[in-house]
Image (tube, rainbow, N blue to C red):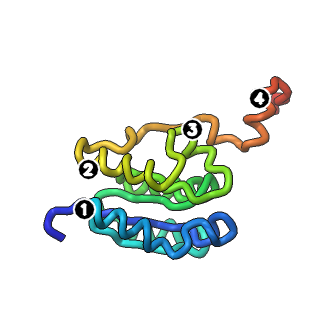
Amino acid sequence: MNGARRLLVFVNARARGGEGAGDGEAFEAKLQQAGFAVTFERIESPEQLDATVLRLAPDHDAIVIGGGDGSMRAALPAILKANLPVAIWPLGTANDFTRSLGIECEDDCLHALRDWSNVGSILPRSTVNPFSTMRRSDFLQRRRGTLRPT
């Protein structure tokens, strides 16, 4: 597709109880209007992610994960193997990870993708949010000073 950046968009079909992305057509249309070539994949279970990412990633320039904190946790091993830039389309219930990065809605995701397309970086590949790597309850206990050492 005439030099357009190629996005591999994964959507967790179960995000927000199956209502997170709807059918995803509106966001896909926004991405296409912004000049991206889009491969859209609905994922019914986290087990599908690893094999699907590895199979499709070589033909793409970046990955977009549509889901929440659980989707990001499930996608992380495949993302690391694919070694591509990643954008997050927040579709979960809490979206703690995406909110910590300032991504509150699909327009924030689209803005990050446009910046990446123009500048070449979505997030540094080594970026990790340490608070989202622990369970939410652990974070809240640590914040309150009640987390017990294990």
Residue with the mark numbered 1: 35
For mark 2, what is the residue? 117
Q: Nearer the viewer, mark 4 or mark 1?
A: 1
Compute the Cα span from label 4 to label 1. Answer: 44 Å
Task: Say if mark 2 contacts mark 1, CB within 8 Å.
Answer: yes
In front: label 2 or label 1? 1
Question: Residue at horizontal 29%, vertical 64%?
Answer: 33
**Residue type (three-letter) at the residue carrying disc 3:** Ser
Disc 4: which residue: 142
Q: Which picture quadrant has residue 7? A: bottom left
The one nearer the camera, 128 or 69, is 69
Q: Is label 1 in a helix, a strand or a loop?
A: loop
In the picture provided, is 52 more to the left or to the right than 85?
Answer: right
Q: Quadrant of the N terminus?
A: bottom left
Q: Is residue 37 left or right of residue 139?
A: left
The answer to whether one can see residue 137 in this image is yes
